Amino acid sequence: MMNFKKITSLLALLLVSVIGFAQDKKVEMADLMRSNGRIYVVVAVVLTILIGLILYVLRLDRKISKLEKEAKS
Amino acid sequence: MPLFTPPKAELNGPLTVDKNYMHKSWWKITSVVLLLYTFIGGFLLDVPHLPALQETIRNLYFHVCMWFGMMILFTVSVVNSIRYLRTFKMKYDIYARQFATVGIVFGILGYSTGAIWMSYTWADPNNPAFDSFSAIAREPKLIGAAIALLIYFAYMVLRDSINDMDKKARISSVYNIFAYAMLFPAIWIIPRLLPSLHPGAPESGGGGNPALDTKDIDNRMRMVFYPAVLGWTLLGVWITTLKIRLSLLKEKKMMS
């Protein structure tokens, strides 16, 4: 008896969730991801790559400046 | 008597490595700050919620900026080609070449990011992959952009196939003007006339530039988009100036 009640309530809950899913016509965005704070992980990764590339370009700039100084003297 | 005697190319004089804007750091810092803002604001600020596009709308800050950067770099390149043809100073030809090279890099990046973006927003999941692909492959914007890039590849091939330095500079400068003229029908005019899935087509809102139209782009997005264009373009210019300085050094070494 107890088991039957559990299974029916489970099924009812599942049905409710399925109906809820079907009625959810809102455009799906990354709201969940942001509420979890995980989007910041992506931002951190992308920023690391950007800063790495910029440092690389900066190093090239310095090297070429040095070469120019040598060429002048 | 020859009808036209070109002025003698000055080889040694103008090829000095003077201090100029290329050695200033304020615009490089501006570029870095704007790019950092683009990456942080581009991911975290709110964007319009649209069906099918969803979060991919943020690609505006990256994919579209590549094309804007390419356009600006190609414009600087053609200006330098004209300057070369007016003065026959070798350094302008070097400027034109390097701006075109970095412009091509931006173009390839714009093309490949567009390919990724469209395969997740244009392809119809209910259609078989081949049907979807054949619809996408007929896109006038894709074909036009491919033609424009191939014309610029030809510019590089043409340049490097001529050994004589003056002839190389002169022919490729003239070609560069034609290549620039071809950009406009290939990527701006024809895709705006034909039915297309890409924004800016006649039936998707009456044409015009979708990124610049005040009715088309959301105000929140413009707060990030314009700084992003500037930041990416300045980064392109930075890389170009490095290449220019390097090839000026190389030329100078060859002369001495």
Image (cartoon, rainbow, N blue to C red):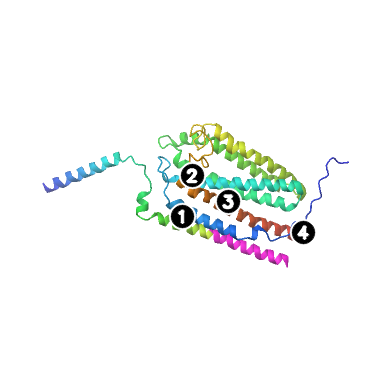
User: What is the spatial separation of the Cα atoms under label 1 and label 3, in whole angstroms?
Assistant: 18 Å
Front position among marks 4 and 3: 3
Amino acid type of the residue tagged 2 in the rendering = Ile
Q: Residue at x 54, y 49 (%)?
A: B229
Q: Earlier in the sequence, mark 1 or mark 2?
A: 1
Between residues B240 and B50, which one lies in front from this camera angle? B50
Given the image, what chain letter belongs to the residue carrying mark 4? B
Q: Are marks 2 and 3 in contact (CB under 8 Å)?
A: no
Q: Secondary structure at mark 3?
A: helix
Front position among marks 1 and 4: 1
Q: Secondary structure at mark 4?
A: helix
Q: Which residue is mark 1?
A: B40
Amino acid type of the residue tagged 3 in the rendering = Thr
Q: Earlier in the sequence, mark 4 or mark 3?
A: 3
Q: Which mark is residue B116?
A: 2
Q: Secondary structure at mark 1?
A: helix
Between residues A33 and A5, which one lies in front from this camera angle? A33
Q: Is residue B101 above or below residue B189?
A: below
User: What is the spatial separation of the Cα atoms under label 2 and label 3, in whole angstroms?
Assistant: 22 Å
Q: Are marks 1 and 2 in contact (CB under 8 Å)?
A: no
Front position among marks 2 and 3: 3
Q: Quadrant of residue B191?
A: top right
Q: Which residue is mark 4?
A: B255
Between residues B120 and B84, which one lies in front from this camera angle? B84
